[in-house]
Image (spheres, rainbow, N blue to C red):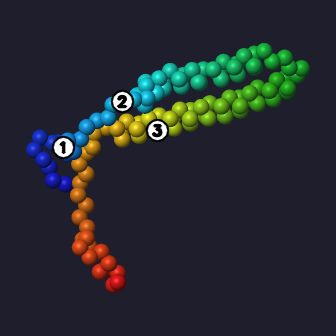
Amino acid sequence: MTRHPGHTAQTAWLRRLPGSVRSVPGLEWMILRRMPRAVALATAAPLLIALLAIGLHDADTALAFERFRSDVTILLIAVLATLWTAAFTLAIGCLIVVVMKGPAYVADAYELRDAESPDARHGT
């Protein structure tokens, strides 16, 4: 990789394409800013519902209570896994949009040895 004056090894691969512009930020930044609070609320709500359900459950026997508590715990884990996966997927999508809206960068050239005659190697 060729180095340009003023570029360190870390930023040498992050050279902006001259004349490239950055698009206006949109919905993706609003979603990313609200994501921590939304994940916290999406985690707290099922936890509170599960604790309330377990606390208010009137079981006849200890075995029935344990079975109910186990069912609620499994359901809680499933709901939290689904919510966290959805939030993570949404955050990845927003980050992709942020990168795509950002300025263009110069890519390193990839020399093609058979660029002049691509089929010569295959004998056609």
Quadrant in the picture for the N terminus: bottom left
Please state the horizontal and vertical placement of residue 10, each as a whole percent of the image. 23, 42
Q: In the figure, is residue 13 to the left or right of 60? A: left
Task: Report which quarter residue 101 is drawn in.
Answer: top left
Which residue is identified by label 3?
93
What residue appears at the point 60 percent right and 20 percent down from the top-left corner? 44
Q: State whether residue 10 appears in this view.
A: no
Q: In the figure, is residue 117 to the left or right of 26? A: left
The disc, 3 or 1, on the residue closer to the chain's N-terminal end is 1
Q: Residues under labels 2 and 3: Cα distance?
A: 14 Å
Secondary structure state at the residue bearing disc 2: loop
Few, some or many residues within 10 Å of mark 2 (<14, 14–19, 20+): few
Which residue is identified by label 1?
18
The disc, 2 or 3, on the residue closer to the chain's N-terminal end is 2
What residue appears at the point 56 percent right and 35 percent down from the top-left corner? 86
Circles 2, 3 touching at the beta carbon (< 8 Å): no
Q: Residues under labels 3 and 1: Cα distance?
A: 27 Å
Quadrant in the picture for the C terminus: bottom left
Please state the horizontal and vertical placement of residue 120, each as a whole percent of the image. 29, 80
Q: What residue type is labelled 3?
A: Gly
